[in-house]
Image: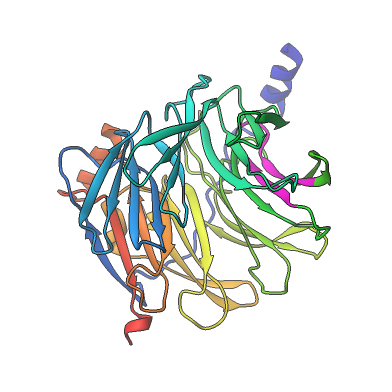
Amino acid sequence: MASIVNYYVNAAPERTLQPLKVPTAQKNLPLFEVKEISWQDEHLPQTTLLHYDTLSSRFYLADRQKQVTILKSNFEVERVISLDSPASAMRVSKEEDVQVLTTGTLNPSDLSIGNLLKINADDKIEVQLHSLPRPVDFVECDLNQDGKKDVVVCGFGHNLGKLLWIESYRESHSQEHVLRALPGARTAVVKDFNEDGRPDIMVLMEQAQEGIFLYENQGNGHFLEREKLRFPPVYGTSSMQVVDYNQDGFDDLLITNGDNWDYTNILKAYHGVRVYLNDGKNNFKEALFYPLYGANQAIAADFDGDGDLDIAAISFFPDLLNSPEKGFIYLENEGNMQVKAYTTPEAVSGKWLVMEVADYDQDGDLDILLGSHVSNMLDFTTLTLQGKETFPQILLLTNQRGAQ
């Protein structure tokens, strides 16, 4: 251990990397009309999940107060459901049954007290899985192709955690399989990535061993792990979207890194939004980098209707002194892996932890919703110093293209 410490003491630079000259973002956000949405002032907004169900045209917003608020498409509160702990992921079925993943605790913890819940149409709650290690994502699937429902669970944990799949998880004879016995599993996507007829799993791992890992399905419940990208443990990788960004028929990766909930809460030159292009063989190479301090999530979609994919991104740790409005960035695709950045002054009205993209007004284009999480008094003080007196749960960016 002493030799490791000495290595870092002797080899580490005396100063951190200087922050990059961050590209200017125009503050006159085109295409979108911005509006703050609030429905309660009992406590500061602490949103943990924001989901829009296209079948019922309802919004589901979960918060740190262990509640799920169900909103109509006009943002009127329909009802509120109490949970055992804050929710981190959700799935709504055609039968309007709702599956909710609860973390057990938001704060770093190695307690395995997370649950997968099923909320029936009459709001009765059924526990489908329990004793999960601070879970943050799940995917229902049929990995072994036996016609029974399996589930992949990202047990993020803290010092302990695991990526697992549970075979026949709705049956009495379910069986757990551990794919990676390490903390940090954040996002899982199930798809036949190598086109061999079997569903594979692409996973974003955070914490100490950050990277992208592909679990190739070998059949009979066996998987082969392939490391696709590896990041330094200080990168703070925070989100992954599997999307064909350059529209060449192969799945690319849209990645953000900007998690600053660690021991070095400073501006980091390597934080931002990145696109990794697929060479056609599931090997990925960085092709786009937009610097964004504290980048937390990005979603690619054709917002302006010109046939290519633009990017909406949020930051939970922006540069509050120089550019607090960069809690939200809209990157318009200009072709050849170039983007033009926009933001809006209204982005200073919250701390944006989650984002949803949906055509909520059903006018044929995609709108953007940001969910605020004011986690502590420092966040509150920072917002008030920006002149804020009210604190919305949602910042709604309504796309005006369909109205033109």
Q: Is residue 206 magenta?
A: yes
Q: Position of residue 153 (x, y in %)?
A: 60, 37
Q: Position of residue 375 (x, y in %)?
A: 32, 36
Q: Is residue 368 magenta?
A: no
The chief SS type of the magenta part is strand
Q: Is residue 309 above or below residue 12?
A: below
In this view, which residue lies farthest toward the top?
2
Colouring:
rainbow
Q: Residue at x 29, y 50 (%)?
A: 70
Q: Residue at x 56, y 73 (%)?
A: 309
Q: Position of residue 172 (x, y in %)?
A: 61, 29
Q: Quadrant of residue 248?
A: bottom right
Q: Quadrant of residue 374?
A: top left
Q: Is residue 140 above or below residue 305?
A: above
Left or right: 65 in relation to 115:
left
Q: Residue at x 52, y 21 (%)?
A: 112
Res. 325 visible in picture: no
Marker count (numbered): 0
Left or right: 202 in relation to 309:
right
Q: Which residues are magenta?
A: 199-216
Quadrant location of the C terminus in the rendered image: bottom left
